[in-house]
Image (spheres, coloured by chain):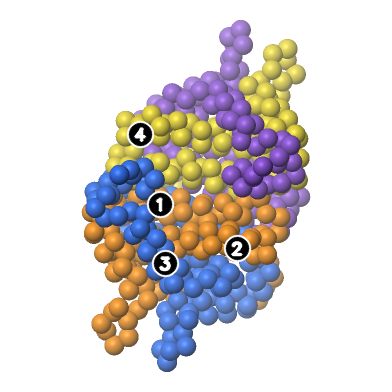
Chain colours: A orange, B blue, C purple, D yellow
Amino acid sequence: MDNAPRGSELTALRDLIRQFVAERDWDQFHTPKNLATALCVEAAELLEPFQWLRTGGASELDAAKLDEVRHEMADILVYLIRLADKLDVDLVKAVTEKMALNRAKYPADKVRGSARKYNEYHD
Amino acid sequence: MDNAPRGSELTALRDLIRQFVAERDWDQFHTPKNLATALCVEAAELLEPFQWLRTGGASELDAAKLDEVRHEMADILVYLIRLADKLDVDLVKAVTEKMALNRAKYPADKVRGSARKYNEYHD
Amino acid sequence: MDNAPRGSELTALRDLIRQFVAERDWDQFHTPKNLATALCVEAAELLEPFQWLRTGGASELDAAKLDEVRHEMADILVYLIRLADKLDVDLVKAVTEKMALNRAKYPADKVRGSARKYNEYHD
Amino acid sequence: MDNAPRGSELTALRDLIRQFVAERDWDQFHTPKNLATALCVEAAELLEPFQWLRTGGASELDAAKLDEVRHEMADILVYLIRLADKLDVDLVKAVTEKMALNRAKYPADKVRGSARKYNEYHD
């Protein structure tokens, strides 16, 4: 997909999405605000099959629901990649940096086994 | 995903996240339902800086807001990769398949320049 | 709240919100789209304190979290009332009508004790 | 809420919803977490018809979309009232208190005509 010595998965998907959008002349609708809105709508559609589950484990979803979930996950990644394209964000770099920040905010020896938010921790 | 000599970006991020979670013993909180919930919360946090904008173009965001947006995008990808890990979803494959479905649902010659939903199109 | 023969709670709140917005000259930002966006952002903020809970029962929230939840619920109602004001929607009438539709979609004898979606029910 | 001769709108809706839930034996699914999740899903469904609009004004929605929007607003209020019922929250009191807090956080003479967040204001 990428002609570079080793292509990137996300770059290949970005190009696939770019082509899809160009063929439909949909770039005009893709302001960052609209893309963030669409991403949020898809995230809620992902959440929808889980809403009444008791434990929320994978075993509570049947095959049809899992397939729906998989498609919603794809939609989310599509809009995320598209938004990154419009805002010149390198997603891999952004995650790597954010994970470093998370390591600093949630030191393993302070938060082990607890889901409380980082700002609730005290020495 | 990455049986090739070179590793995949998403696989590398998945492993980074796995390690972060393991060090904190947070896997116990990572039911698919909770991860989908967290992803939805992050998607709304991404949307938040856009909520009162008029056009929603990138130029309406200052540098601080863009940095915030970048971090929220990272959070979304982190939870998406983590959920994919828990549900054994291959994200690249899921997007590729979903884009093929989208091509069938939104034929370029029917929808060009219009954002109406696919089910509003008629022959 | 209303001194009228019988005032409406929601009308009183609508007027309180109208005044707050007018004093700040914020009506210019209150397009229906922006209000729907703000409502969605607040709904996710309501969800946030629940995201890592196991059972999701009220007993898992401490007093501070319950207060946060209460404030987010207020924010949601504020934006809902404001959006209804802008779109001339009578919320009480809308709920009454929707509940009648729900009664038809989810007949009690078909759905008792099950949370499956209405479109998954068959005779 | 309604110890007066006349009942309150929100109390009447609460009772309507209670009856609907009881007839279906759905209380077992109505943990606060699940209700907050359902509310968030409905908020995103409300947002969905707005996602690709340019201005987001009411005139961009046709009659069918407006009807959809009205129904989603009803769903949101239903879940909000139900959650308030489960958590013993008086919604009218909560909004009144939150609006007083908002008045303190966003003094009219400081924020007039600007949508920046309260924490971005300085003397």
Decide: is B15 above or below B93.
Answer: below
Q: Secondary structure at mark 4?
A: loop
Kindly identify the amino acid type of the residue bearing the numbered disc 3. Answer: Glu
As drawn, the label of residue D61 is 4
Kindly identify the amino acid type of the residue bearing the numbered disc 2. Answer: Ala
Decide: is C67 above or below A113.
Answer: above
Q: Is residue C28 visible?
A: no
Q: Among all residues in the image, which is located at the extreme front?
A: C123
Decide: is B24 above or below B121.
Answer: below
Q: Is residue C23 left or right of residue A122?
A: left
Image x and y of residue C105, in percent: 61, 36
Q: Nearer the viewer, mark 4 or mark 2?
A: 2
Q: Which residue is mark 3?
A: B97
Q: CA distance from mark 4 to mark 1?
A: 17 Å
Q: Is residue C87 visible?
A: yes
Q: CA distance from mark 3 to mark 2?
A: 17 Å
Q: CA distance from mark 2 to mark 1?
A: 26 Å
The C terminus of chain D sits in image quarter? top left
Image x and y of residue C29, in percent: 35, 36
Crowding at dot 2, Cα within 10 Å, few <14 / some 14-19 / many 20+, comes out as few
Q: Secondary structure at mark 1?
A: helix
Q: Among all residues in the image, which is located at the extreme top?
A: C5
Q: Which residue is mark 1?
A: A38
Kindly identify the amino acid type of the residue bearing the numbered disc 1. Answer: Ala
- Quarter of image, res C121: top right
Q: Is residue C87 left or right of residue C49?
A: left
Q: Nearer the viewer, mark 2 or mark 1?
A: 2
